[in-house]
Amino acid sequence: MIAQTYTVAFEGIDARLVQVQCALSPGVPHFSLVGLPDKAVSEAKERVRAALNTLSIALPPRRITINLSPADLPKEGSHFDLPIALALLAAIGILPPDAVEGLVSLGELSLDGMLVPVAGALPAALAAAEAGRSLLCPEASGAEAAWVGDTPVVAPRDLGAAIQHLTGARPIDISVPGEVSAHHSGRDLSEVKGQERAKRALEIAAAGRHHMLLVGPPGSGKSMLAARLPGILPDLSPEEALQTSMVHSLAGLIEDGGISRRRPFRAPHHTASMAAIVGGGKGAKPGEISLAHNGVLFMDEFPEYTRGVLETLRQPIETGDVVVARANAHVRYPCRFLLIAAANPCKCGHLADAARACNRAPNCGEDYMGRISGPLMDRFDLRVDVPPVSFQDLDLPADGEPSAAIARRVAAARTAQARRFADHPEVTVNADAEGTLLEAVATPDAEGRALLLTAAERVGLSARGYHRVIRVARTIADLDGSDDVRKPHVAEAISFRIPSAAG
């Protein structure tokens, strides 16, 4: 007879349903797997054999064939162990065939029959819900998968418990979702002394999700400022939390099955490879830009990243997603992040200090910042000089505006944007607006338009730069509680676009 059950194969954050068929036929005893399995899937037969032996279940002396359909879809990962075992148990009559046929299952088997948690339980639960099936997964993955309320999730501890549940001998309770982690940050902007202009830019960036470049000597507070950005960002909406958790589930980053409402903050090292930043490697896994989806990507020592990594950022910044192309797969991941980049003004970092600068100044500054190409630099809405803090300022008490107060203004600006773009689900913040929509919501008044045109001609703004100034001005107006974009808003936006214009 032929028994069948279902599991999933992952393509980015999407989970495609895979039919697992098991056939027993006469012939020399043999256990074979077909359907484009990778090495981890091919080894499943040995783990399944050992796990069944632990339960004193002997395989019949027949030819066993497991087919993973569709056969032209690559199958990767150890999560195929459990569905293979269930299909085999149904084929030999230990499990009712109809009990496993209505299931989507995933999980790795240890040799003693324990179910090992695997990445991707949340996307698998969504696929099961769309197919109208229940989900069977390891106990440690149940709380994560249970966030998809449209399908029952059963999470046994081991293969024996799964068998008892499916035969009705000892049913397992439906899993419940893990706890929601609220937004908490122990780092406050009031701790940053001085740098009022940089703090203002941070507030604007948080309110409209505008990319920002911080340039200053070592120790001026660039990393300190960036680390406090999550404290002024609003919590993820339920929809955003699900989107972000889908990516984190595939990367195995969800802890205790809880979905966090905190926006992710990713800070990769400047030696990270392109696959680590953009995504790729074995299985085309999500990279840092996707793990930062709906959150912050902080790239310190920005010019030190390889040229290939920096240039690859250009397209995801514009589109909000990235396609990881491999010989056997084209995988799309979302990556709508807020980029905060920090850089020293030159290799030695002391370009403006004649007493400490190297003997190549000022040419070293042009060479160093020249590693950031013009098209990439054009994508930063806010460019902020971060000067060194004087010892007098450091000696003052920390009495700056707390993050909570700034966060309230940011939340109010985000609420205004949510109302403005309610009829445009693909647009959530000002940074997403473009074309006729941008013109409709952010065109400055007559004085503001005249100032913008004058500035654009004098400094040679590109078309992209022109529209980015308008977006920033719209965000500044939102922080000001203004329905209209006026001349002061445009002036401040221009000053951040071209720092020297502030003087």
Image: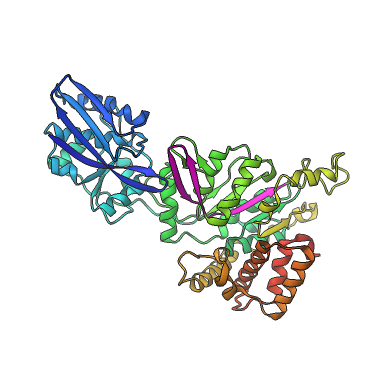
Residue 406 among magenta residues: no
> Quadrant of the image for the C terminus?
bottom right
Q: State the residue lying farthest toward the top.
A: 28
Task: Residue 493: give x, y in percent of width and height.
Answer: 69, 67
Task: State how the image is colored.
Answer: rainbow
What residue is rendered at 42% in x and 46% in y? 12
What residue is rendered at 59% in x and 78% in y? 483
> Quadrant of the image for the N terminus?
top left
On the image, which quarter does residue 250 sit in?
Answer: top left
- What segment is highlighted magenta in the picture? 321-343
Q: Is residue 130 visible?
A: yes
Task: Residue 300: give x, y in percent of width and height.
Answer: 65, 45
Query: Along the line of sight, which residue is nearer the eye, 7 or 477?
Result: 7
Q: Is residue 210 above or below residue 217?
A: below
What residue is rendered at 77% in x and 67% in y? 457
Q: Is residue 397 visible?
A: no
Task: Residue 260: give x, y in percent of width and height.
Answer: 44, 53
Main SS class of the magenta portion in the image = strand
Task: Residue 102: give x, y in percent of width and height.
Answer: 19, 47
What residue is rendered at 66% in x and 57% in y? 380
Give left or right: position of 293 versus 259: right
